[in-house]
Image: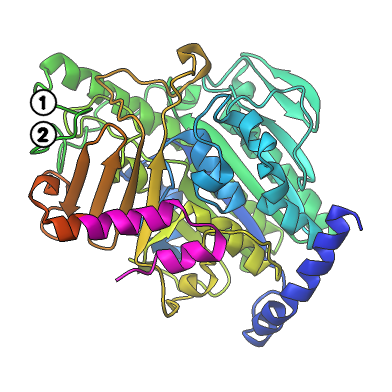
Amino acid sequence: MPFVTALALAAALAGCGAQAAEREAGGPRQPNIVLVLADDLDWTLLRFMPEVRRLQRDGATLERFYVADSLCCTSRASMFAGQYPHNTHVRSNVPPTGGFAGFREHGGARRSFAVGLSAAGYRTGLFGKYLNGYPAAFPADPGWSDWLAGSDAYHGYDYDFSDNGTPVHFGAAPEDYATDVIARAGDRFVRDSVAAGAPFMVQLSTFTPHLPTVPAPRHAQLLGRARLPVGGAFGRRISDPPRWLGARHALSLRDLARLRERFRQRARSVLAIDEMLGRIRATLAELGVAEDTYVAFTSDNGYHLGHYRLMQGKRTAYEPDIRVPFVIAGPGVPAGSSSAALAANIDLAPTFLDWAGTAMAGHDGRSLARLLRGREPRRWRRALLIEHHENRRERAADDPDTQGRRSGKPGSYEAVRSEDHLYVEHHDGSREFYDLRADPYELANLAGSMSPRARERWHTRLARLRACTGHVCRRADRFR
């Protein structure tokens, strides 16, 4: 039996109970799904995004939503497949340990939520950034009905996208600005899907506010007085820091000026993303399908900007890098609600498939469907795994996320982010342990004062998570 046919049969059988429950609850049988995914966006930028704040008022905010790795390609692979990096086998942005080539080589494309949604009868569209190293001459991956995607439009102009396998060049005209191209493609896809009478899932993936952080021309002169956030861990040092961080000098006046301008550029660049979100929601309302559509906004990772005396960057296990916004509105989601339950990007694939009334095997994550309706499931997770591996064979020129020492080069590590603690084991032998109840900004590393029993307990918890697969992960993350 062909793979897609077999999957469709399995999906139909697995989905009967979920669809019946949805019908009893009065919701849509197969709701539409819109995912707006930004690149390197952190919580500090939401104050410049009125459409995101409106989405918060209309729906729910997950206050503790994390990424499995604070690195673009690794995080996106986990999102598509619903698996931790040790199961996607995507460890970096470039081959041989990652990138688009690594995702396909290890079967990630066949495990993507798009495959399950397509088999369940959805039209699926991806517009914008896919995975690092995706070539514009390459066709769409399995499961995607429509596709206008690439991997190198960071400068906003003069880039190539794959239009369902046909390379298309976008130049330097104002209308070629990448976020606007993505917005137009997504709007067209929604209109075509509604006209076809099919449920749809569309992902709009921007290249901003990722470096070099190019705003739309209409926004380039705005926010000249926006203030750089300097609270929390900004400019402060960690006591007993890990080896890679070490003792760092205080930020200089020149550093502060650079960080201030970087923040303003990031703020300008998200204005077009916010407009895109408003446009897609207006189209849903115009077409009469807003009440049957989930609209979610998030990012592939966070960003540090002066935290711990580091310049701009990511890759660390600290809150600014791994905790990202997640805002959603849709059927059954209480307006203005929020949840502090631990959630992650590995949960998106099982959630989307749950909404569609289907399932795929092998997910490490959990469906958020009940949680988003305001009913936290019993026996919910108590911890998440964060894992980051440096590819020592990568070439800096091939990786848009290459960082120097001043931005932070944490090396390889695994970490447990629990409800109240962060525990990190670095491959160089360094350890970190933070009590987030007393130390929410992760400034006092307590690893050196842990008792042998406590250290062994946290090591065992981490070992179980970094070796888990599928349902085993959903047992390992409930530790006491």
In x, y percent, where is residue 418? 30, 60
In the image, is residue 472 part of the stretch drawn in magenta?
yes
Residue 231 position within the rendered picture, expressed as x and y whole percent measured from the top left = 14, 41
Q: Residue at x 68, y 50 (%)?
A: 111
Magenta span of residues: 456-480
Q: Residue 41 at x, y = what percent? A: 40, 39
Where residue 440 appears, as percent x and y from the top left, is: 17, 53
Q: Nearer the viewer, residue 47 or 9?
A: 9
Distance between mark 1 and mark 2 Cα atoms: 8 Å
Residue found 50% across the figure and 35% down from its top:
91
Q: Which badge, 1 or 2, comes first in the chain's sequence?
A: 2
Q: Nearer the viewer, residue 393 or 257?
A: 393
Mark carried by residue 247: 1
Front disc: 1 or 2:
1
- Label 2 CA crowd tier, 10 Å (few <14, some 14–19, many 20+): many
Asked if the residues shown at circle 1 and circle 2 are in contact, with their CB atoms under 8 angstroms apart, the answer is yes
* Res 321 quadrant in image: top left
Residue beneath label 2, please? 237
Whether residue 434 is situated above or below residue 368 in the rendered picture: above
| Kind of residue at badge 2 | Arg
Q: Nearer the viewer, residue 406 or 85?
A: 85
Q: Is residue 438 visible?
A: yes
- Element under disc 1: loop
For this orientation, the residue located farthest to the right is 1
State which quarter of the image contains the C terminus: bottom left
Q: Which mark is residue 6?
A: none
Q: Amino acid at mark 1?
A: Ala
Q: Is residue 325 visible?
A: no
Looking at the figure, which quarter contains the N terminus? bottom right
Q: Judge from the rendering whether residue 479 lies leftward or rightward of residue 228; answer left or right.
A: right
